[in-house]
Image (tube, grey):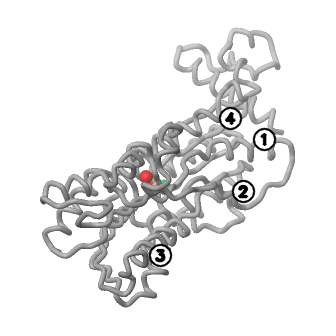
Amino acid sequence: MKNRKRRMVSWITALLILCQTGCGFFSVTPQGEAEGESSYTYAEDESELIVVGFSQVGSESVWRTAHSNSIQNALTKENGYFLIFDNARQKQENQIKAIRSFISQRVDYIVLSPIVESGWDTVLKEAKDAGIPVIIMDRRVDADASLYTTWVGTDTYKEGENAARWLEGELKSHNALYEDVNIVILQGTLGSSAESNRTRGFASIAQRYGNWHILDQQTGDFTVAKGKEVMQQFLKKYDDIDVVVAQNDDMAFGAIEAIEEAGKTTGVGKDMILISFDAVREALVLVQQGKINVDIECNPEQGDDVEKVIRMLENGESVEKEYVVAERIFTHRNVARYIEERTY
Ligand code: AHR
């Protein structure tokens, strides 16, 4: 069944090539079924590859580039894959379009890294009806679980909790756990599970302390520019910020720029505590320099896990409904030994 489907993708590819080059439509025959097949070298070469359509969120952050590289390095031709990579440029409508195009190309698998959590049921049902397994990656969808095969990603709720737990420990070590603390939060893309889980995870601990005041939370869309803009607004509105929580490193970079331009400082023993998420190399260097107090890792290296899941499915093995990628927490105390090995 899978082989037949793969052959069909190749056939469609061959058809497209032929149509583009102006040859007669009806002269094309499926791979391996008639004479002349060898003239379609491209299609023939690809015919045994597993065809995967991947819809990526966009290229909003350093982390996202690492995430795209991870999938591209795992689903290579050498490993037996033909990857169709689609960058949705932060628009759910582009992701839906891409999925429909993957369905019409009859790919073997669809991998979706969803921008937002809701609004997927219809298109996932279309994929299911077409018999194409869907693997959700990175962020979550709130669709009926029967509409996708599995999910591979990070526990972003726990990341939010870990950020607050670190703050708890830090304040405790300075005998300041019950002193007033003013917090602002730079949120990621609203509607994404990465944002909502980090926000809720942090709040679940923060609400235990009546003296932790969340002054404001606004979206900086996971980008440097928006992170800086929102931080500038916070600085204009509040002159007593103690803690900045940036829900990714790019927004933390933007926040540092805004704070320094306002003549203030962040980091260990400075005006404001800065908590960040992702732990890309550039941010780990800032942790080492003491400008970021703590970086809660969000691990983008999920490509190998997705590849393993596809292998298992190809072998007819059953897969778990969720695969959670392992993560660490970095402070100036432990960061040095990890910086060198960071590739992104
Ligand atoms: O979904 C993961 C988040 O998306 C990362 O924290 C962020 O950097 C990215 O844009």
Residue at mark 2: 149
> 10 Å neighbourhood of mark 2: few (<14), some, or many (≥20)?
some
* Contact, mark 2 vs mark 3 (Cβ under 8 Å): no
Question: Between disc 3 and disc 1, whose residue precedes?
Answer: 3
Q: Nearer the viewer, mark 2 or mark 1?
A: 1
Residue 218, how many percent across, how many down? 30, 69
**Res. 51 mark:** 4
Find numbered disc 3 in the image and state the secondary structure of the residue it sits on: helix
Quick check: 314 above or below 29?
below
Location of residue 43 with respect to 301 vertically, above or below:
above
Q: Does the residue tagged 1 have its C-beta within 8 Å of any atom of ligand 1?
A: no
What residue does disc 3 label? 200
Estimate the spatial distance between the alpha carbons at disc 2 and disc 3, rounded to whole Å: 26 Å
Q: In which of the image's four quarters is ligand 1 placed?
A: bottom left
Q: Are marks 1 and 4 in contact (CB under 8 Å)?
A: no
Sequence-earlier tag: 2 or 3: 2
Q: What is the three-letter code of the residue carrying label 2?
A: Thr
Q: Is residue 321 visible?
A: yes
Identify residue type, mark 3: Arg
User: Hey, which residue is sitting farthest bottom in the picture?
Assistant: 210
- Is label 4 in contact with label 3 (beta carbons under 8 Å)? no
- State if disc 1 and disc 3 touch (CB < 8 Å): no
Rounded to the nearest angstrom, the CA distance separating label 3 from label 1 is: 35 Å
Q: Earlier in the sequence, mark 1 or mark 4?
A: 4
Q: Secondary structure at mark 2?
A: loop
Q: Which numbered disc covers residue 311?
A: 1
245 and 105: which is toward the camera:
245
